Image (spheres, helix red, strand yellow):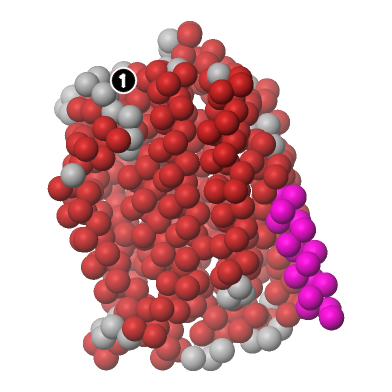
Amino acid sequence: MDSRTRELGEKPIRKLLPAYAIPAIVSTTATSLYNVIDRIFIGQGVGASALAGLGLTLPIMNLSTAFGILVGAGAAALASIRIGEKRKEDATKILCNALILSIAISIIFTCVTLSALDPILRLFGADAETLPYARSFLQIILGGNVITQLLFGLNSIMRATGYPVKSMLSILITVGCNLILAPLFIFVFHWGIRGAAWATILSQLAGMSWVVAHFISTRSLIHFEKAGMQVEWKLVGNIFAIGLSPFIIHICTCLVTLVMNWKLKEYGGNTAIATYGIIVSIQSLIITIILGLSHGMQPIVGYNFGARQLQRTNRAYVLTIVIATTICTVCFAIVMSFPHTIAKFFTQDEAVVALIAKAIRLCCAALPIIGFQVVTSHFFQYINRAKVSVFLSLSRQIIFLLPFIAILPSFYGLDGAWYAIPAADVCATCVTAGILVYEIRAVRE
């Protein structure tokens, strides 16, 4: 093992966490940021109907992300643990199997969804006004799904195996290209929503090339090897077991978005759907900061857990919780103080601005406590406690959020849909705290 991996078990946590977390935060935030920027460009350059159409693509996008994370997150966590156990050859096999799985799953997903795209979009709430926008966007995005899956899946493994800065650079390359191409395709070439889609895929191709080049190089700690390019089904099962928690989160997010769109269509029409898409992008930008922090924690926790240095594992977790809560509290203050300013980035329609401003305040009401719930759920995943992580993921999405979305609009109309989000956050955080206390007591006994 080189000095990069040795420092995971020796360097002080207070210095180690920022070194890994800051590049990871930049990576995940940049990824979410260019989704926000896409919506800004589409809202200002194409119109509100295009924003509504884009909002209707969220379930499919979340489903695609779910399959990518099933492989990427599972392989990253497992590779990190194997390196901590000084099993570099096994980590290499994990990388090679992740490559094969990402390609196979993305091709199957693309073929299935494209073959029934219009019926799927109508099921999600598309009508004559929004269907052309949603279809045009997804035809291109799904056509490049292999690129997307390889970029984010392999990038997770790169970060988890000791290359946080290179992982960050791959995302910055992607975002930088998108910032150049999206306005060029939308405002100069007038390609509309298809221009945004082409900008996304071409930008991801640039980022993917950077990541693949890293794993081709024999100078990397682990890299592609011909001997590892054989599917090992036991290994695949282990990857899926660890990746199951974030996979379920995104599957549930897909289901939640679907039900939410139905309710918004019923109580607020296409404007409400467009508003929800904007709010999701803003919330995702905040949450991805916490996810980046959690991803920075991953190689530290994975290595030290694998090396049985449990005190260092716990210190990394506690420090991550403190930082996450601070970040969420600051973001909460910004959102509550400047909702109209945030809304005007996306549209100049005063009625839509007022709806966005009201909705974002309601949806983000429980933001300060979210960091604890997100970090704790990921922590259990990183220490190979997949069942606990899966349950915590399900507690928010399925046990609380879906029922709240289904019930509250009947009593409070459109506002009820917004109330559902903070109500689920509060309930899920309470459950997470209870599970954490139980797990700590079980370890001590």
Magenta-tinted stretch: 429-445
**Is residue 377 placed above or below 184 in the rendered structure?**
below
The residue that appears at 57% across and 31% down in the rendered structure is 407
Q: How many marks?
A: 1
Tell me if residue 439 is in the magenta stretch: yes
Query: What x and y, as percent, mark residue 204?
Result: 29, 52
Q: Residues within 10 Å of mark 1 (few under 14, many from 20)?
A: many
Tell me the element at label 1.
Answer: helix
Please name whichever residue, 318 or 207, is drawn nearer the observer in this view of the structure.
318
Query: What x and y, as percent, mark residue 357?
Result: 57, 19
- Residue 240 visible (yes or no): yes
Residue type of the residue flagged with mark 1: Ser
Main SS of the magenta segment? helix
The residue that appears at 68% across and 32% down in the rendered structure is 365
Tell me the residue that label 1 is attached to. Answer: 49
Residue 129 position by quadrant = top left
